Image (cartoon, rainbow, N blue to C red):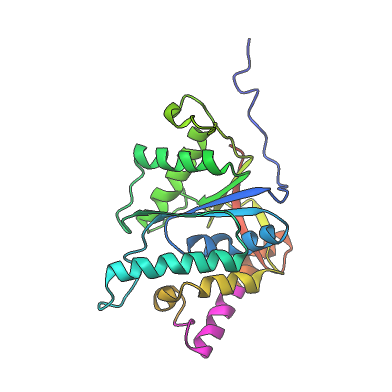
Amino acid sequence: MTNLYADVRRDDPTLPTPSRALTIGAHPDDAEFGAGGTLARWARQGCEVSMLVVTDGSKGTWDPDLDPAALVRRRRIEQHEAARTLGATGEVVMLDHIDGELENTLALREELCGWIRRLRPDVVLTHDPWRRYMLHPDHRAAGMAAVDAVVAARDHLFFPHQLTDGIRKHRPDALLLWSADEPDHWEDITDTFDTKIEALLCHSTQGQTTMGDAHDDPDAREAFVRRIREWAARTGDPAGLALAESFKLVRP
């Protein structure tokens, strides 16, 4: 009898530096929070990092006087600055779905599948859509759409109209889910922690909402750095690392 699961790849805790990596985040700054240190280290080691942002970030402010269209423009600029800070040499893709209204539709799966096939990453990094009590609907939707797109991208019968002009099906070697409910993979960010911080601070529009005014107040910046450092230390402790980011590793 044929073993239908003969091609299922077993979990392997090791993960070499990929040649190409793609992040899929719901908003500008999501990938930097979840995997900025990892991306910076991989980039230093020659990885071509591409960053895809699904929404336009148009609800990312507490300032009632800030025009949403102006906010979108600023957040786009900030994302490109953060990518440069991390050393990302691949593409920065902004899909501009409306912030706060994201849904995991078949159309979104198709869109993400197309980008995975074009960019051909060895590793895809995204939100853990199964994380318990994750409140933000965009994070849940983006994570699930990304996971579904990874599955679609690997098989030629999914969205076959995409497979033209040199675009082929593509199966990444690994999927890393940040903010994971059950992490089982750790990346050392001891040497790239400062770069992660600098990339986060590129997102100055988020200074009030997520960074406690760290973008323009020295004391607030010190408090923010201390908070992220403490988080990275707690994250790395189970793996014996001074500072780390953790993920759920899936072999698609």
| 218 on left or right of 60 | right
**Picture quadrant where residue 191 is located:** bottom right
Q: Is residue 95 magenta?
A: no
Give the residues drawn in magenta, as a range. 213-229
Image point 67% across, 56% down: which residue? 186
| 15 on left or right of 21 | right
Expressed as whole percent of the image width and height from the top left, the position of residue 29 reads 48, 65
| Relative to 155, residue 28 above or below | below
Q: State the count of labels.
A: 0
Expressed as whole percent of the image width and height from the top left, the position of residue 94 reads 42, 55
Identify which residue, 75 or 6, lies in the foreground: 75
Q: Quadrant of the C terminus?
A: top right
Image point 42% across, 28% down: which residue? 161
Image point 35% across, 65% down: which residue? 72
Q: Main secondary structure of the magenta part?
A: helix
Q: Is residue 231 visible?
A: no
Identify which residue, 217 or 180, lies in the foreground: 217
Expressed as whole percent of the image width and height from the top left, the position of residue 246 reads 61, 57
| Relative to 216, residue 160 above or below | above
Q: Quadrant of the N terminus?
A: top right
Expressed as whole percent of the image width and height from the top left, the position of residue 101 reads 29, 54
